[in-house]
Image (cartoon, helix red, strand yellow):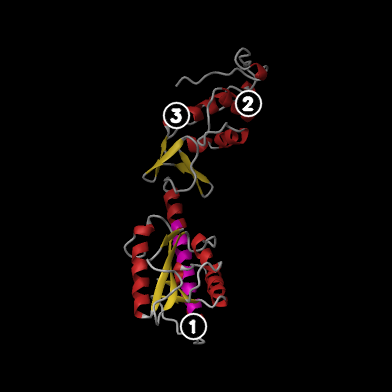
C-alpha cells in the first residue's frame, strides 16, 4: 500500500468543505506509471473533482492489486475506521472492484459508516432509486470486460500452444524463458540428462533424488530434489524431446530439445542387466550400476 499524504491536519476541512479520501488502485507496478490509468492520472482527476465539488482531500490511499481480490491493505484502513471522512473518491467504479459482489460489499460497508463512494467519471445522483441499478450495470460491464480479457488470453495461449510455442505459465525444469520462448538452461539441461541417464541405468525416482542430493545438486529453489520432482521430470520425456501436447496429441514444439528421440529409453528386459557400482553408492547394491554424466 502507498499513501500520498497532503500537507495539513487530517480530519479538518477548510470552511464549507467536506473531507474525502482519494482511493487509487492499479493492478500492477507497470500500470502505476501508465498515462491513462496510472497513479498520477487518477490522483489528478480526483483532485480536480474534489476542488470543483467542495471536497478537501485529506489523504490518498493506493493499492497495487487485481480488481477481483479483496485483500486490500489500503482500502481496509478506510473500512477499519482509521479516517473520519465524508467520502471516498475514486477515478472510476472499477478502481474499487471489477467484480459486482465485491464492489457492492465495499459500497454498503462504506454506507453503513456514513461514507459516500463517489466516482469521478460516472455520475450517480444520490437518493435516486436508479443509482444502484446504474452502479450494478457498470459493474456488470466491468466484470464482463475482465472475463473477455481472460478468454482472449486463454485463446491466445491455446493458439500459441497449437503452433508449438510457449503458452505461458510454469515451465519444466531444464528451461528458461526469454521473449516468450523456452530455451534450454545449460546447467539444468545437464541435470535433466543425468536424471534420465540414471533412470536408464536402473535407478528409481527416490534413488536418483538421493544421488543428486549426495552430489550437492539442488533444485531451482535451492532445495534437495525429492522423488516426486524426479518422477515429474521423467514424465516429461516427450517435452524434453521437443514436443508439446495439444488436444491429446504431441506436436513439434519451438523449445530446445534436451533429449534426442528415444534416448535413454530403458528396455524392461535390460532392467537388471548390470549391477550397481557398490564403491560409490553402497546402499543401492543389487539395483543397477550408476554412471556419471560427463557431457
Residue 252 point in image, percent of width and height:
44, 41
- In the picture, measured across the screen, residue 39 lies left or right of residue 88, that is left
Q: Which residue is mark 2?
A: 207
Give yes or no for contact between labels 2 and 3 (Cβ–Cβ under 8 Å): no
Label 1 sits on a secondary structure element that is helix
Which residue, as the protein is rendered here, is positioned at the far top?
279
Q: Which residue is mark 1?
A: 131
Say which mark, if any, is on residue 187.
3
Q: Is 16 placed above or below 211 here?
A: below
Residue 180 point in image, percent of width and height:
39, 46
Residue 112 point in image, percent of width and height:
57, 76
Between 140 and 32, which is closer to the camera in this rendering? Answer: 32
Q: Is residue 136 magenta?
A: yes
Q: Would you identify the image quadrant in which residue 89 lies?
A: bottom left
Residue 66 point in image, percent of width and height:
48, 60
Which residue, as the protein is rendered here, is positioned at the far left?
35
Label 2 sits on a secondary structure element that is helix
Report the mark closest to the observer, 1 or 2.
1
Crowdedness of circle 2 by 10 Å Cα count: few (<14), some, many (20+)? many
Label 3 sits on a secondary structure element that is helix
- In the picture, measured across the screen, residue 199 lies left or right of residue 123, that is right
Disc nearer the start of the sequence (3/1): 1
Q: Would you identify the image quadrant in which residue 111 lies?
A: bottom right
Q: Which residues are magenta?
A: 135-153
Amino acid at each position: 500500500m502507498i499513501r500520498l499524504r497532503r500537507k495539513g491536519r487530517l480530519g479538518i476541512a477548510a470552511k464549507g468543505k467536506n473531507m474525502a479520501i482519494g482511493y487509487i488502485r492499479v493492478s500492477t507496478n507497470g500500470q502505476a506509471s501508465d498515462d491513462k490509468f496510472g497513479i498520477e492520472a487518477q490522483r489528478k482527476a480526483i483532485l480536480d473533482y474534489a476542488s470543483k465539488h467542495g471536497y478537501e482531500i485529506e489523504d490518498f490511499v493506493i493499492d497495487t492489486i487485481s480488481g477481483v481480490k479483496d485483500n486490500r491493505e489500503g482500502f481496509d484502513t478506510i473500512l477499519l475506521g482509521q479516517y473520519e471522512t465524508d467520502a471516498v473518491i475514486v477515478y472510476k467504479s472499477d478502481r474499487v472492484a471489477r467484480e459486482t459482489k465485491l464492489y457492492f460489499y465495499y459500497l454498503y460497508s462504506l454506507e453503513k459508516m456514513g461514507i459516500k463512494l463517489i466516482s469521478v467519471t460516472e455520475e450517480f445522483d444520490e437518493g435516486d432509486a436508479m443509482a444502484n441499478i446504474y452502479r450494478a450495470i457498470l459493474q456488470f460491464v466491468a466484470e464482463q470486460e475482465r472475463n473477455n480479457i481472460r478468454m482472449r488470453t486463454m485463446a491466445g495461449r491455446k493458439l500459441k500452444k497449437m503452433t508449438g510455442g510457449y503458452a505461458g505459465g510454469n515451465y519444466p525444469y531444464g528451461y528458461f524463458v526469454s521473449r516468450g520462448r523456452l530455451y534450454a538452461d545449460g546447467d539444468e539441461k545437464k541435470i535433466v540428462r543425468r536424471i534420465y541417464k540414471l533412470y536408464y541405468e536402473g535407478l528409481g525416482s527416490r534413488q536418483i533424488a538421493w544421488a543428486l542430493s549426495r552430489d550437492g545438486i539442488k533444485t531451482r529453489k535451492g532445495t534437495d530434489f525429492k522423488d516426486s520432482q524426479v518422477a515429474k521430470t521423467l514424465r516429461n520425456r516427450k517435452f524434453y524431446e521437443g514436443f508439446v501436447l495439444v488436444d491429446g496429441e504431441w506436436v513439434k514444439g519451438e523449445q530446445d530439445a534436451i533429449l534426442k528421440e528415444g534416448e535413454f529409453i530403458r528396455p524392461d528386459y535390460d532392467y537388471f542387466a548390470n549391477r550397481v557400482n557398490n564403491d560409490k553408492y553402497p546402499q543401492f547394491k543389487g539395483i543397477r550400476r550408476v554412471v556419471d554424466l560427463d557431457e
